[in-house]
C-alpha cells in the first residue's frame, strides 16, 4: 500500500506542539497501521473536517490529535491530508 503525505500534513505537524512520544505514535500510525488497516479511521465526520478536507476522508484518533486521511481502495493508496487537535474539531 502506497502512503502519500501531503505538504499540509507536514505543516500541521510542525505547527503542533507535542511530545516526541506522541509524534512517534502519529508516525507509527501512518507508517504501520494505515497501510495494513486503511479503513480503521472513522468516516462519520464533524462539519469542521468535511468542510476543510471533503466528504471522502477518514479520521483516526491519536490522542490528542486526529489524523485526516483518504483511502483510495481502487488505487490501493492512502493520502494523509492533515493533523488537527481534537479541540479544533468539536
Image: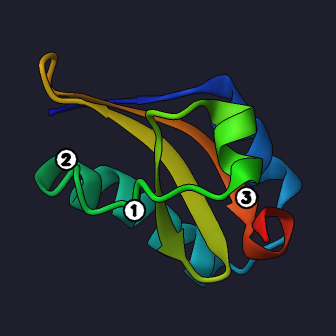
x and y percentages locating residue 55 in the rendered image: 52, 34
Task: Compare marks 1 and 2 and give the one earlier in the sequence.
Answer: 2
Location of residue 73 in the rendering, given as x and y in whole percent from the top left corner: 16, 29
Spatial CA distance of label 1 from label 2 is: 16 Å
Q: Quadrant of residue 53?
A: top right
- For residue 42, which numbered disc appears in the image? 1
Q: Assess disc 3: are there few (<14), some (14-19) or many (≥20) residues with their C-alpha within 10 Å of its C-alpha.
A: some
Locate residue 84, reporting x and y percent. Answer: 73, 58
Q: Residue furthest top?
A: 75
Residue 39 appears left or right of 66: left
In percent of the image, x 59 and y 30: which residue is there? 54
Q: Which residue is mark 2?
A: 35
Left or right side of 20 for 62: left
Nearer the observer, 53 or 25: 53
- Decide which of tag 3 and tag 1 comes sooner along the chain: 1
Q: Tell me the residue that label 3 is attached to.
A: 84
Amino acid at each position: 500500500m502506497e502512503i502519500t503525505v501531503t505538504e499540509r500534513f507536514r505543516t500541521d505537524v510542525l505547527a503542533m506542539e507535542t511530545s516526541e512520544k506522541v509524534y512517534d505514535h502519529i508516525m507509527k500510525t501512518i507508517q504501520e497501521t494505515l497501510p495494513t488497516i486503511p479503513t480503521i479511521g472513522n468516516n462519520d465526520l464533524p462539519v469542521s473536517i468535511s468542510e476543510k478536507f471533503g466528504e471522502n476522508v477518514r479520521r483516526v484518533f491519536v490522542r490528542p490529535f486526529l489524523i485526516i486521511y483518504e483511502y483510495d481502495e481502487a488505487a490501493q493508496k492512502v493520502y494523509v491530508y492533515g493533523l488537527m487537535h481534537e479541540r479544533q474539531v468539536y
